[in-house]
Image: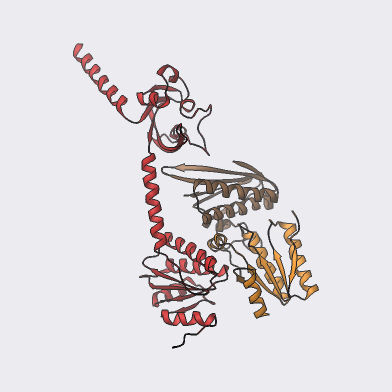
């Protein structure tokens, strides 16, 4: 019937238009990873013609290897999709002819029919720019995190760590690393940790602070905790922590005096 | 990467390898040290309780994130009570026993499967 | 695996751990330290772990036990040179080292021992 045929031809024309004009590499693979069909982009990307690609193994064409993609290099998403029966997306790292790194997002979509999974749709897209942007964002976040946990050298052998704001687990990690790095760098024997600016100190935050103090202790640095309010006293007692060796003060001034005293110094009016 | 664990040198080699692999996929020095320490604990356990075993370290991937997976397998006597072994403060001998509770704190995931008289398999993962 | 050397500095013993220890070697080291303490009448032991980038529970236990033995012999133990990443790992792991003084480096360790023995 000419009408149905027209419709079919029309549909085909549309599909061809779509598949041949997208930027993604699309392949139809058999269960054993042989290429059944590819769109134009695959042929232009690898500089091959249809005849040399059909019936070849996917990994032979994309990675030039005779075995399935595995770690420590790229993981095969088809293998995972076959196991889980679900669409799977992984990230591959390829290199172009200049040796530059290209990040490729590879997805495998299982095709189900009455016999189970018979074929896979394999789609690759170049996500290098996106990855670079994400990496830049992460770096900015790292920089912000570092800036918000400054360690200041107060005097020879004395450093202070003024904490302001919420201390979540990420920040706590950064604080620990910053403090220890500063201890080694300045050869500090005393660290004054000021939590006046920390709004709430529950048992979790107290636990993180204690861990920081203990880690500093392993480097031979004594910590003085200042800015303590009733809630931290409660949290510490609730945690059943033994704070011997750690002086705590509610006032920064008194804490600083204690720090100076410990290194044998005294502040005198001139 | 697979390493046979039989001697102290294997412990040292495993630690270095794990640290290298961790560094390669982007873990910072603290996480590298945590991973190497867990490897040290687990491989030492193998030598202590099972005489020899196998260590497998691989890079794993989930949507949008990469990680490291450690699998320690041996044909030793097995762990009688896994729950107890994972409980903080438990020890078969003086001190920290098998170090499993500690290892659990250093990694993101830790699974133990063991059969008395047959052997033990410990899988641990840490994500970037 | 070679033996770990024990050196004498002033009135103290210095143990520089640079290689990995296990079972027999660890036992031998502890025995050596105790014997040297008795022989030299040293008042302190410095355990230097600057070279170690990994300290696991076995080593932690070893250091703790050694400090205990040293105390019984009337001497003090100082642990020096813990690397930052190692310190953080030890704390997160939950390894507590009691009865041991810690110092940033050997110089500080010696200063403390001179003042406290």
Chain in orange (letter): C
Quadrant of the frame with the N terminus of chain A: top left
Q: Answer yes or no: is residue A250 visible.
A: no
- Left/right placement of residue A50 relative to residue A4 reads right
Location of residue A264 in the rendering, given as x and y in whole percent from the top left corner: 55, 82
Residue that sits furthest to the right in the current view: C39
Chain in brown (letter): B
- Left/right placement of residue A111 relative to residue A153 reads left
Location of residue A231 in the rendering, given as x and y in whole percent from the top left corner: 39, 75
Q: In this view, does B59 lie above or below B48?
A: above
Chain in red (letter): A
Q: In which quarter of the image is residue A21?
A: top left
Residue that sits furthest to the bottom in the current view: A269
Residue at 41% x, 19% y is: A49
- Left/right placement of residue A52 relative to residue B46 reads left
Residue at 52% x, 53% y is: B107
């Amino acid at each position: 019937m000419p009408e149905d045929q027209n419709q079919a031809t029309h549909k085909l024309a549309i599909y061809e238009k779509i598949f041949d004009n997208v930027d993604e590499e699309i392949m139809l693979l058999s269960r054993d990873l042989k290429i059944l069909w590819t769109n134009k982009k695959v042929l232009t990307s690898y500089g091959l013609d249809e005849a040399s690609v059909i019936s070849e193994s996917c990994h032979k064409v994309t990675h030039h290897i005779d075995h399935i993609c595995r770690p420590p290099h790229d993981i095969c998403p088809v293998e995972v999709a076959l196991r889980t029966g679900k669409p799977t997306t992984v990230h591959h790292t390829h290199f172009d002819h200049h040796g530059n790194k290209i990040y490729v997002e590879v997805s495998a979509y299982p095709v189900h029919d009455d016999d189970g999974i018979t074929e896979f749709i394999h789609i690759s897209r170049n996500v290098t720019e996106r990855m670079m942007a994400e990496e830049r964002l992460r770096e900015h976040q790292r920089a912000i995190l570092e800036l918000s946990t400054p360690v200041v050298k107060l005097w020879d052998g004395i450093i202070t760590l003024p904490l302001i704001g919420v201390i979540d687990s990420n920040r706590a990690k950064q604080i620990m690393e910053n403090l220890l790095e500063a201890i080694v760098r300045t050869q500090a024997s005393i660290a004054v940790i000021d939590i006046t600016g920390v709004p709430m100190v529950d048992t979790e935050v107290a636990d993180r602070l204690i861990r920081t103090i203990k880690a500093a202790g392993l480097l031979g640095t004594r910590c003085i905790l200042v800015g303590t309010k009733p809630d931290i006293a409660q949290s510490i007692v609730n945690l059943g922590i033994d704070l011997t060796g750690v002086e705590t003060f509610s006032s920064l001034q008194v804490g600083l005096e204690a720090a100076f005293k410990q290194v044998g110094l005294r502040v005198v009016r001139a | 990467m697979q390493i046979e664990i039989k001697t102290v040198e294997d412990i040292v080699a495993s630690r270095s390898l794990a640290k290298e692999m961790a560094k390669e996929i982007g873990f910072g020095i603290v996480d590298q040290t945590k991973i190497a320490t867990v490897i040290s604990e687990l491989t030492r356990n193998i030598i202590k309780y099972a005489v020899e075993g196998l260590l497998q370290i691989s890079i794993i991937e989930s949507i949008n994130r990469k990680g490291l997976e450690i699998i320690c397998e041996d044909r030793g006597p097995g762990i009688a009570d896994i729950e107890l072994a994972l409980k903080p403060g438990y020890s078969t001998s003086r001190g920290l026993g098998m170090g499993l509770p500690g290892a659990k704190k250093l990694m993101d995931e830790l699974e133990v499967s063991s059969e008395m008289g047959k052997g033990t398999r410990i899988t641990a993962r840490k994500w970037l | 695996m070679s033996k770990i050397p024990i050196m004498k500095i002033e009135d103290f013993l210095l143990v520089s751990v640079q290689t990995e220890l296990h079972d027999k070697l660890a036992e031998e080291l502890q025995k050596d330290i105790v014997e040297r303490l008795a022989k030299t009448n040293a008042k302190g032991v410095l355990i230097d772990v600057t070279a170690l980038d990994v300290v696991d529970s076995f080593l932690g236990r070893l250091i703790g036990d050694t400090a205990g033995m040293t105390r019984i012999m009337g001497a003090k133990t100082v642990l020096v040179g813990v690397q930052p990443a190692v310190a953080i790992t030890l704390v997160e792991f939950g390894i507590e080292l009691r009865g041991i003084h810690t110092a940033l480096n050997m110089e500080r360790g010696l200063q403390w021992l001179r003042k406290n023995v």
